[in-house]
Structure formats: C-alpha cells, structure tokens
C-alpha cells in the first residue's frame, strides 16, 4: 500500500513519541543529553495542527512538525522509525514540508539540528539547505539552515 501523509491526531501521540525515542536515543551519548526533539510537547504540536504523520500499511512510520513563522516555515522536526529507513519516507515528508510551505506563501523553509548530528547536516546540505548560523540555545549547540523555495 502506498504511503500517505495526514494531519496527526491524539491517537498518533504514542506512535510519534515512540519514533522520537527510537530516532533520537542514539544521539544522547554523542550530545551528552537528550536532544531537543526528545523534550518537545507533541500533544501541543498535534493540537495546533503542526504535526503530520506518514502512514504505510496502516502504521505510523514517521512524522513531521511544521510551524509557520513570520519569515519562513520552520521544519521543527522530521523523523522516521528506524525499521522504516531506506523506503523514501523521510524524503516524502521533506517534500511535503516544501509543498506545505509553498502553499502557505513562504519563499523559504528553515530548520535547525544539533551540531553533533553531522549526518543530518550532510543530508540537508545535499537537499539544498544552506547553513546560516550556529548558536547555543537551551544548552544545545544548534546549526540553523535554510532552503529557498522556487
């Protein structure tokens, strides 16, 4: 069955939180603490219609959190269950983010990731995101990136 993306509901909360634990736990040792996504309030994101899930074969396999801001759409988080890696679901979610940003009238999409998540920085760079700056926030060393939408 073809994967599809829909708005997250309260029924998806446990699946989202499980994916967050699976996806970000490997970074705890590297960063020295839980990464920002492990501290987020996903109930808040769901109730504000910021969270979307990708479903394959009736199971939540990943999610994305998009937050409208003044100057750009913020791609606050994207994660796919490790068991579903390599199926193109993350790419679908990132394409969804760009489509959503364009439909909302944004000319760019921005994100941030921890500087210790070098794989993510490399991936986003390959996808056309450019680093804008680095800053320490909430005790986390973040790398901000932006992609101009055409």
Image (tube, grey):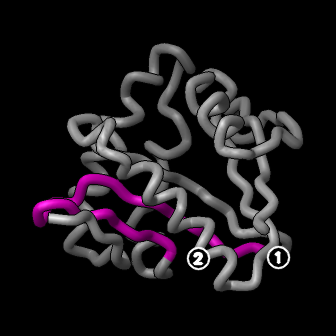
Callout 2 crowding tier (Cα within 10 Å): few <14, some 14–19, many ≥20 = some
Q: Is residue 32 above or below residue 137?
A: above
Return the mark for residue 2. none
Decide which of tag 1 and tag 2 comes sooner along the chain.
1
Q: How many marks?
A: 2
Q: Is residue 17 above or below residue 36?
A: below
Quarter of the image for residue 102 reads: bottom right
Magenta span includes 62: yes
Residue at image x 59%, y 57%? 76
Q: Is residue 144 above or below residue 51?
A: above
Q: Which one is in front in this view, the residue at disc 1 or the one at disc 2?
A: 2
Numbered range of the magenta stretch = 50-69
Magenta span includes 34: no
Residue at image x 62%, y 59%? 75
Return the mark for residue 70. 1
The residue lying toward the viewer, choosing from 80 and 89, is 89
Instruction: Give left or right: position of 142 versus 56.
Output: right
Q: Position of residue 7 (x, y in %)?
A: 37, 78
Residue at image x 65%, y 28%? 122
The residue lying toward the viewer, choosing from 18 and 128, is 128
What secondary structure is marked by label 2? helix
The residue lying toward the viewer, choosing from 59 and 50, is 59
Q: Position of residue 63 (x, y in %)?
A: 38, 59
Q: Position of residue 3 (x, y in %)?
A: 26, 64
Q: Position of residue 1 (x, y in %)?
A: 14, 64
User: Pointer 2: what residue?
Assistant: 100
Instruction: Give left or right: position of 145 versus 44.
Output: right
């Amino acid at each position: 069955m073809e994967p599809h993306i829909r708005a997250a509901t309260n029924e998806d909360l446990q699946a989202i939180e499980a994916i967050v634990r699976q996806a970000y736990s490997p970074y705890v040792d590297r960063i020295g603490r839980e990464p920002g996504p492990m501290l987020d309030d996903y109930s808040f994101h769901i109730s504000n219609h910021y969270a979307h899930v990708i479903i394959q074969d009736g199971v939540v396999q990943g999610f994305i959190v998009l937050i409208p801001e003044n100057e750009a759409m913020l791609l606050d988080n994207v994660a796919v269950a490790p068991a579903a890696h390599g199926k193109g679901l993350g790419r679908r979610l990132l394409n969804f983010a760009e489509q959503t940003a364009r439909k909302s009238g944004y000319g760019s999409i921005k994100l941030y990731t921890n500087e210790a998540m070098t794989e993510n920085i490399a991936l986003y760079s390959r996808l056309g995101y450019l680093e804008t700056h680095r800053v320490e926030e909430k005790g986390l060393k973040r790398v901000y990136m932006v992609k101009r939408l055409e």
